[in-house]
Amino acid sequence: MTEAMVHVDEASAVRRGVDFLLDRREADGRWVDYDLLGPSDDWITAYVAGVLVQLPHEAAGRAGRAAMDLLVPEQHDNGGWNYSEVAPEDADSTGWVLRLAELLGRSGEPWARPGWEFLARHVHDDGLVSTYVPDLAKAAFDRYPVVPSWDGWCGGHVCVTAAVAGLAGLPRREHVVNGLLRAQRPTGEWPAYWWIDPELSTALAVESLATVPGTEPARAAAARWAAGRIGADGAVTTHLHPEGSPFATALALRAVAQGEPGFGDAQIRAAAGWLTRHQRPDGSWTPSARLRMVLPWETDPDSYEDWTFDGVGRACLGTIARDTFGLHTTATVLQALRTAATRTGA
């Protein structure tokens, strides 16, 4: 297969993926996914819309802009948005909404100011950003009978920090960037709190740092780690997806592509090719965005050994779930294929 044919296949995959996401909208234009303290609505809507508005696809752009209009009135009195109706407002969901606003040039509108102030409440002294603040977590989750502490959920989370560090309007952004840089592991990757895949934190960190002068060594180290995760066939394998995880593969591709100019072209092509070949007939990719419902007091989820899998409902602490409908995975892959096309000039 020639390189030109590969680019055509990837462009076709993007169109089919967009069609899938557009078809999976709810009647009001939002997206919902996961069944873990869910379904998730505001968070996944902001995430999917943020991908769609960056694609050269007219219908995708319209859907993303419409989602922004739907999200604004969903803002809570404290300025934040939440993962789902049963979860408290959090920095991650709020960050994805504000990222969408920045992409659309709307982050300076009056409603956004309380959102930025809400995010600022979650910035810790070390520069890391927590998902929750204690008062909101306790008020929303007091139904759990025994919670010895909220140190886990209200501590600094590298994956959330990586997601918001790239926001131009983020209060104390330089402080957050420095915290993110300190959290990088010696091997080049960034760990994740809510996710089994460090590829997520690593890709988001590299993308957030892309415009920050002086971060080139950190991004280069991340790119080399991510390139090492991509196998000869183009896939990133995990213990839950031994034949290849579309989610982790897409994120590794993004980390390589944004990490070090001129490095990793072979891995980028291999990963993009693998993703294209593994698209499902309906235009989606196999759900593989593995979200873990960490115990509220657990500060090191990587050391926790008693996970259950694919729990549902409101009380599912200690479970690892996947995106039920594949929306999170599919949007993440589309972003990766767009990044690959930009890097290769396709």
Image: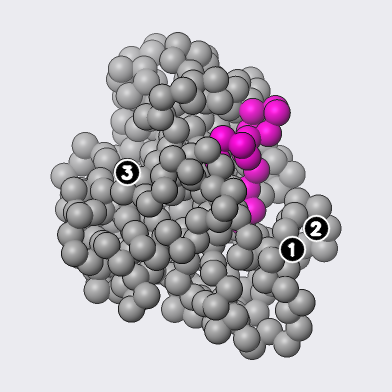
The stretch drawn in magenta includes residue 185:
yes
Q: Is residue 295 magenta?
A: no
Tag 1–tag 2 contact (CB < 8 Å): yes
- Up-down relation of residue 313 to residue 339 (above or below): below
Which is more toward the observer, 186 or 322?
186
Figure colour scheme: one colour
- Give the residue number, with chain letter if any, for mark 1: 298
* Residue 231 location (% of width, % of height): 64, 24
The residue that mark 2 highlights is 304
Q: Residue furthest front?
A: 125
Q: Can you say whether 94 is above or below 329 in the image?
A: below
Answer above or below: position of 88 versus 156.
Answer: below
Q: Amino acid at mark 2?
A: Tyr
Name the residue: 33% across, 78% down: 77
The secondary element bearing badge 2 is classed as loop
Mark 1: amino acid? Glu
- Marks 3 and 2, the one that precedes in the sequence: 3
Q: Which residue has dot 3 on it? A: 168
